[in-house]
Image: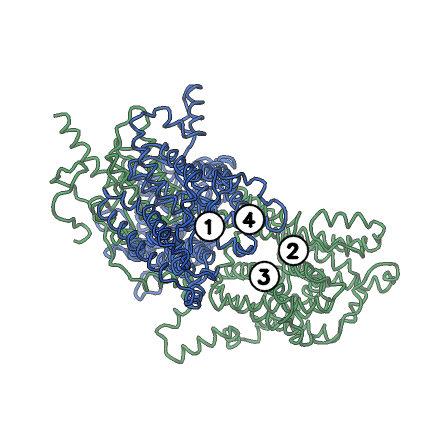
Chain colours: A blue, B green
């Protein structure tokens, strides 16, 4: 059997003598080289198509193939062909419930983004998604750096649409190019910190509406906001504060109730609309707007107009719009795809992240052409949708129709809605973004991750949303780089009673054979760490030799089990290691190289230089052979 | 014995029944948590001090400690205290040999950097190092983008000194902060391509001197240079061309000879100086300078003056100088440290990369204050030094004195040296930077690496040195990211006759137990790959189940041997995987988690949720236990 074959002839011990009897050891197989296309091709495949999106098409008839293709392009076909009337009840209830949640939320979020309220409402006509707090805030912050929404409102809106358009283009592009994995570079820990920071920042911004302040800062950092709040105490309006705080308590109470008794979720879902109606009636009846309580005022009636002619493709703001689009699109995707995955896991179905991106992208492109700004999946709405017993995407159609009716006929009713109630709704909505439990778990699991959480949080809190985002990305990258430049290595020992070799630090009772050092390298050996691994391996040998009373080390065995690949720099480092060890009369041996590694050892000539007899199947077998040579030499020495 | 202990009580099978007899399996030990300081501290230690620079101080007497400390600060003390007069012969010969190589080279390199020749000579007064071709070219290219050396020569020089000063500051800073590992982010493959591209670019630039063209382009890309060369055919001077080509042939022949017969290295070493002398005498005798052959002309006599007052710390060029300093310092370090390592390996001693950086940095700071521009380790000089039988750094002192004498008394002799001979010397010097053998080995070992080589080469060749550098860095980073987002995973099988489980693709004869899928993950599970690993593990199960005639899969065993660490995102992905599998009635089991992984499983609660009986010591033992449950269930089913 090939696995047990061993090349004929004796094996040379390091001092050159021939040894006749070698214990039966297994051989490491060298697979044939794959060629550039296979090698690069496999890498590309794993990067872009690891989820094998075309697998289900394979081996099907042409008719089924085209039907599957249609369904792939229009996921609606998945459910509409099997839609039954009794499903409609669930969808109807869910749809109206989300609409009642969505309308007041959207009015508020539009303020965050600095666009007129009606743009917020228009945005949510589309399916399952709508403007969310963090994206609105981010977009608003970035837009305000370019243009003032109060001084140039028309231009500001144009820039918002253009940025939304670019965001859609980026999202669609990322999806089509299957580059969805870029959003995985924001770690969970960084997102938790970023979201909490954004939530606090958004809540602080609502102090404008809650306290009824007119001249509020456009900066979002804690210090500026506090200055703005306490610098305008004269503008505070007690009526506004009382209305706001009263309804805020009501909304938070409804949320707590829904959390404790999931069956009462609808209380929390309709609470915002109820609050809006009550507050509006209250203002109207007592004419509080005449006593300084600011109201939403006139909202343009009717369906959203085309904004295709408002997109800016020339002039100095194109670059800014593209930049804003890129940043918001990535954050929107991070949030949207994460929410999609959460609900997919709840119901045990797969979602294709890249396909989701294309959907979000097309939606935002269409949105930008019809006076909407950047939207994405909303967690609160999706949760209400789920709890309200949604059956299919028909619920979104119901919601869209409800919002449409509102747009066509009910907008005048919002005229007396006080701003303070919208602020209260937003505060209660964003509070759930502060996930103390997640932060506590991160602290428990990984202290370095917790640093990322804190960094992102304080970056958003004290500086700005962008800086927080930048800190989050940087910490995430530092961690990756840290991992690739300084991989883990371990000194190995034998677990008594087995032929298994394990990390001596984890299994302190493991034993070491005298004269032999066995080391495991826990990462692919690439240019970024090859020098480190080279130095570290030598240091293990030197440290062992420096121990008082130790046998001189004659063998260094490197366990390559975790080393999935090695590049040119790695091969060069190993060759250098071999040369240095040879000068010190220490024999280098490798255990269990993977297929790619042994192939590269072979093609680089290292295998030949080292001698294939020094490549072993396991560390156990390597130690066995080396010990045999050592005993033999000791026996000869003592004769 | 603790390793063989197993928690008392029966083990629950996935369907809930209690099993009394569990085969003897080993237990995975959970080490006590280390706490934030230990965890972060260890990481910091490995990143910055893995080479344990203070180890040798430990356990020594105070006197020895301070002596070691002095030697650490002034490495000169290492050799000067044991210097013997017979060593001086070797050092003297080596010193004069390098000087004869260095003087003509430096005159030429100064042209590359666009500074007067005397600055090139001044630069090499310092030890073992001097201006090198690639750094000179890079600095020249970057400087010329800011200021024209012909229009504002004084300002240009000031900027060059300032950039050198910043380069020195960066290098010293990187060394003191022990950030030396940043230069490891340029892979060997990228450097090979970059160097070859730079060499060709430099050689093309020399056509100016060789052909005697006056109005030569300042761009370095192939197209511009060719336009410049063939657009000024009228300026070509046949005398200049004949002198240049004749000596170029002589220099290349001397190099080839030295390569074939290493004992004749001195022929190659003194060839440049010989050429300069011969060509100068030739020009002087035949007064070729009056017939259009351009000569070096007057070189300022005397030791280099202070340039401390010329550094620009205010005004609009400070930023540019800092940028140029940063880029050149990194390239200079990459080259210098690589050369240091090569010779350290030849003589089997360690070099401390960070200490080298501090040395280069201090040298460049001093250089910038004394009219020198950025210098680093030079490969050709170091090689000649080595071959000339250098004993200690005293050789550099000899060289410095020789250059000093040249500066003081011999500069007038260079007045009639034709530019063409300097061009010939540079061309012959940079040709050795084109390493075809290395490129061929890279092609053989790793096709992706070869793409990096090509990308860097063509970037430099067709665009510019900076773009080539940028391409090299980007390709290197893409490879790292590629590695961390899409780690290798493998389906495992049992090697017959052993209890070892290996990659089925590498060992096709390995066997798989029915109803069980064993998967190995070959990377630390971090946010960047957690989703991928989660999806991939599920896909392995689904693919196995889709095979016609397969037993339904009831166990998924994940081999964590190579998984050195897991972060919060990874834990969350594993928890989600466990929940999904539970819904499908598949039991998840882990084999051989490392100390950090099992600790995080424990602290996150995943261990409790999963049940510690599903953590196994090896894949073999996991399969053994799962098979037992399967057989038992089958036996009960058939009864």
Report which residue position mark 2 lands on. Answer: B258
Secondary structure beneath dot 4 equals helix
For marks 4 and 3, give the CA distance. 45 Å
Q: How would you rate the neighbour count of disc 4 (Cα within 10 Å): few for under 14, some for 14-19, many for 20 or more?
A: many
A292 to the left or right of B195 = left
Residue B123, compared with residue B459, is above or below; it is below
Say the numbered circle drawn on residue B332: 3
Mark with earlier residue (4, 1): 4
Q: Are marks 1 and 3 on the same chain?
A: no
Residues beneath discs 2 and 4 located on the same chain: no
The quadrant in which residue B60 appears is: bottom left
- Residue underneath mark 4: A159
Q: CA distance from mark 3 to mark 2?
A: 27 Å
Q: Residues within 10 Å of mark 2 (few under 14, many from 20)?
A: some
Q: Which mark is residue A289?
A: none
Q: Which residue carries the number 1 mark? A: A526
Disc 1 to disc 3, how far (Cα)?
Answer: 22 Å
- C-alpha distance separating marks 2 and 4: 67 Å
Please identify the residue farthest to the bottom as the structure is shown: B63
């Amino acid at each position: 059997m090939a696995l047990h074959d061993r090349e004929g002839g004796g094996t040379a011990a390091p001092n050159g003598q021939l040894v006749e009897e070698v214990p039966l050891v297994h051989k490491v197989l060298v697979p044939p080289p794959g060629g550039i296309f296979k090698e690069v091709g496999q890498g590309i495949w794993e990067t872009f198509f690891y989820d094998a999106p075309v697998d289900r098409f394979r081996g099907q008839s042409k008719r089924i193939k085209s039907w599957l293709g249609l369904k792939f392009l229009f996921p609606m076909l998945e459910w509409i062909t099997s839609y039954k009337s009794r499903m409609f009840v669930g969808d109807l209830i869910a749809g109206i419930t989300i609409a009642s949640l969505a309308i007041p939320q959207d009015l508020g979020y539009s303020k965050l983004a600095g666009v007129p309220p009606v743009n917020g409402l228009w945005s949510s006509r589309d399916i399952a998604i709508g403007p969310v707090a963090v994206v609105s805030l981010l977009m608003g912050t970035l837009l305000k750096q370019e243009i003032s929404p109060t001084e140039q409102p028309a231009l500001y809106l144009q820039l918002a649409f253009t940025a939304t358009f670019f965001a859609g283009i980026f999202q669609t592009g990322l999806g089509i190019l299957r580059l969805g994995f870029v959003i995985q570079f924001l770690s969970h820990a960084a997102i938790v910190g970023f979201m909490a920071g954004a939530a606090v920042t958004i809540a602080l911004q609502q102090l404008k509406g809650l306290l009824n302040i007119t001249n509020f800062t456009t900066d979002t950092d804690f210090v500026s906001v506090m200055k703005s709040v306490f610098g305008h105490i004269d503008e505070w309006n007690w009526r506004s504060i009382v209305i706001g705080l009263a309804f805020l308590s009501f909304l938070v109470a409804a949320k707590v109730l829904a959390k404790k008794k999931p069956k009462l979720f609808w209380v929390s879902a309709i609470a915002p609309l109820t609050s809006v109606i009550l507050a509006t009636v209250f203002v109207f009846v007592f004419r509080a707007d005449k006593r300084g309580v600011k109201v939403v005022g006139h909202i343009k009636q009717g369906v959203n107009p085309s904004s295709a002619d408002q997109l800016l493709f020339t002039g100095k703001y194109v670059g800014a719009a593209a930049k804003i689009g890129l940043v918001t699109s990535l954050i929107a995707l991070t949030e949207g795809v994460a929410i999609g995955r959460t609900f997919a896991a709840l119901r045990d179905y797969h979602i294709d992240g890249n396909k989701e991106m294309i959907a979000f992208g097309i939606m935002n492109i269409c949105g930008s052409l019809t006076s909407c700004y950047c939207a994405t999946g909303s967690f609160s709405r999706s949760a209400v949708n789920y709890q309200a017993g949604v059956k299919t995407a028909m619920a979104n159609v119901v919601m869209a129709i409800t919002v449409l009716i509102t747009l066509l006929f009910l907008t005048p009713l919002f005229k007396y809605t006080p701003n303070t109630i919208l602020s209260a709704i937003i505060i209660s909505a964003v509070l759930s973004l502060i996930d103390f439990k997640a932060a506590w778990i991160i602290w428990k699991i990984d202290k370095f991750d917790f640093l990322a959480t804190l960094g992102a949080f304080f970056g958003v809190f004290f500086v700005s949303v962008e800086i927080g985002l930048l800190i989050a990305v940087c910490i995430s990258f530092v961690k990756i780089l840290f991992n690739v430049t300084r991989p883990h290595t371990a000194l190995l020992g034998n677990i008594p009673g087995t032929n298994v070799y394990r990390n001596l630090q984890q299994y302190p009772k493991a034993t070491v054979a005298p004269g032999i050092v066995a080391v495991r390298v826990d990462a692919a050996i690439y240019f970024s760490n090859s020098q480190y691994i080279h130095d570290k391996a030598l240091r293990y040998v030197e440290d062992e030799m420096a121990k008082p009373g130790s046998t001189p080390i004659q063998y260094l065995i490197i366990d390559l089990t975790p080393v999935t690949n090695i590049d040119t720099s790695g091969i060069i480092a190993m060759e250098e290691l071999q040369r240095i060890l040879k000068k010190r009369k220490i024999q280098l041996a490798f255990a269990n190289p993977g297929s790619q590694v042994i192939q590269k050892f072979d093609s680089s000539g290292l295998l030949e230089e080292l001698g294939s007899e020094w490549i072993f199947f396991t560390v156990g077998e390597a130690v066995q052979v080396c010990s045999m040579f050592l005993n033999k030499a000791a026996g000869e020495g003592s004769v």
